[in-house]
Image (cartoon, rainbow, N blue to C red):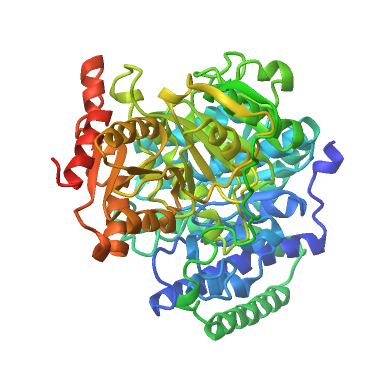
Amino acid sequence: MKADTKPHLTRAHVQELLRGMIRIRRFEDKCAEMYTREKIRGFLHLYDGEEAVAMGVIPVLGPHDRIVATYREHGHALARGVAMGPIMAEMYGKANGCSGGRGGSMHLFDAATNFYGGNAIVGGGLPLAAGLGLADRMTGEKNVTACFFGEGAVAEGEFHETMNLAELWDLPVLWVCENNGYAMGSALVRTESQTDIHAKATAYGIESEVVDGMDVVAVEAATRRAVAKIRETGRPYLLEARTYRFRPHSMFDAQLYRDKAEIAEWREKGPIVRFQGWLLKNGLIHERDIAEIAAEIDAEIAEAVDFAEAGAWEPLETLTKHVMAEDRAAAPVASEPEGEMIETSYREAVKQAIREAMTKDDRVFLMGEDVGAYGGCYAVSKGLMAEFGEDRIRDTPLSESGFTGAGIGAAAAGLRPIVELMTVNFSMLALDQILNTAATIRHMSNGQFGCPVVIRMATGAGKQLAAQHSHSLEGWYAHIPGLKVLAPATLEDARGMLLTALEDPDPVLIFENVMLYNMAGKIGANAGAVDIDKAAIRRTGKDVSLITYGGSLFKTLEAADELAKEGIEAEVIDLRTLRPLDGETILASVARTRRAVVVDEGWRSGSLAAEVSARITEGAFWRLDAPVGRVCSVEAPIPYAAHLEQAAIPQVAAIIAAARATMGRG
């Protein structure tokens, strides 16, 4: 292995290393110039001083290996082979940029080179890289994912969650910490109790080493050792490259936290100065060679600037393109029950959907806390580990951000993961991964990458679990473009919506109300996938539209039955899909009944009910005979005591009262 991992310093190779570093440096210099000329705007984080890391690591990787970078990723993209013109155009925000002008400086994407983009959230890319590695581990591919991050990221929980997952699951990921000494303006010694970053990885059992990040040959040698080891063992490896950034954290940074003498001292031992001097001293390169390299690079940069200048701005008409995939399959039509009807429960319906999906598609797997040996917090996955094995029914640590991000990464690599979060309250710990990665990757990459992950979670109150386990926060997620948000209430939907979601090219969140798991009834033995784009009319009526979803559906149907005894015929609309809302069905119902009440277990202020009410007002105001009513949870954390818990959430009596008031009988 030693012979294969040792760099061969031929004249051609050393010239390529030097050329790559000079190319990155001069490109960055031009970017700084374009920033001062206001051609590049927003944040601009330059890589000046860290070139040896990109050129020492990335050329060692193969074409099928993947790269996850940081917001200082211009050097990584150039070293990977992303064309300079599209990179510069992306910095401008032009439509001919590598991300279509959607990402800018901090979010360069290029599917052709397996460049999965920079990430503007410190540490946010680590779980994504873990997921890419997980996909390779599960499919038997021998690829390596290289993930770059700064030393500031090691303070984030996502670093620790991901290191644990990487070691626990033997993920083939090369973690590259570019330790440049400063997290924005905070020196490492002021923010970390343990300043040896590699020691943190070692604590998790991950093989790691420190390398001089200003020595491109040393970085390459270390990378060759690490990549060879990963390909041999399939296990993770961490390199701590100790380097330095010569320029500010970003172009807004006044650098009041360090003095000029420190920067000057580091510049004297910069990677280009050191390597170029060594090559000249040993006759491996000559001054004329350096001049020729510089001239070639300057010409390439000039062409890149011209390419960016000539690029068009994206037209306003395509602003919402690539929020969701455009090539989605036609919605399935729910099967009418044929012959046999079987007795089942909501819990069992979800389980059977998981079983069917996993049987039909090897890409599908379930991951989450206690989903395996324990059988799931709500026993949805009980018995599935014995049937499908620990690889596909994957117990995770209690690290919501880490394993949710890993699911997102696995989906981006082509698998179809089902991620189970124990409760919606716990999902807040994974909000960064859901909001900043899953919901944005398609749009920011200009459609180059998708994320077909399904995330399930329990929601709602009624189990006397108090505030931290009982809230209904699905309305928060319904606010986020790039997600599809489902709330199945019936047995057919519990089974069928999951099956359809697994065929969807975009991230789908499924909220299962805790009070529905024990609900039992009959379902057609042939029940399968159902439409996840349309609301459903669960009861027809002519006097008032009662609009609800999830756990409140059956309370609303009960209220409608009671209202019928009073001569009020209520139409009950089950929203089913909270994003995108089926406005057509809602407005058509209100147009018939001329009155509406929205029932929502979320809090009234800023609720999903408020959104539905606003859409009714905007689309059917002149048809209304009364203001839209709302029945929501009391504006307080969900209490523990049973009588208070029941009083806090919508109940049948409150729904009846709201309908009566809308009819003028209150």
* Left-right relation of 480 to 657: right
In which quadrant will I find the C terminus? top left
Q: Position of residue 626 (x, y in %)?
A: 19, 54
State whether residue 421 appears in this view. yes
Please state which of residues 364 and 562 is positioned toward the viewer in this rendering: 562
* Left-right relation of 579 to 341: left
Residue 17, quarter of the rendered image: bottom right
Is 128 situated above or below 164? Answer: below
Residue 632, quarter of the rendered image: top left
Q: Position of residue 433 (x, y in %)?
A: 48, 42
Q: Residue at x 43, y 64 (%)?
A: 44
* Left-right relation of 232 to 208: right
Q: Position of residue 306 (x, y in %)?
A: 57, 85
In which quadrant will I find the N terminus? top right
Is 19 situated above or below 414? Answer: below
Q: Residue at x 22, y 16 (%)?
A: 643
* Left-right relation of 260 to 9: left
Q: Residue at x 40, y 60 (%)?
A: 250
Please state which of residues 82 and 29 is positioned toward the viewer in this rendering: 82
Q: Residue at x 55, y 41 (%)?
A: 126
State whether residue 210 appears in this view. no
Please state which of residues 76 and 470 is positioned toward the viewer in this rendering: 470
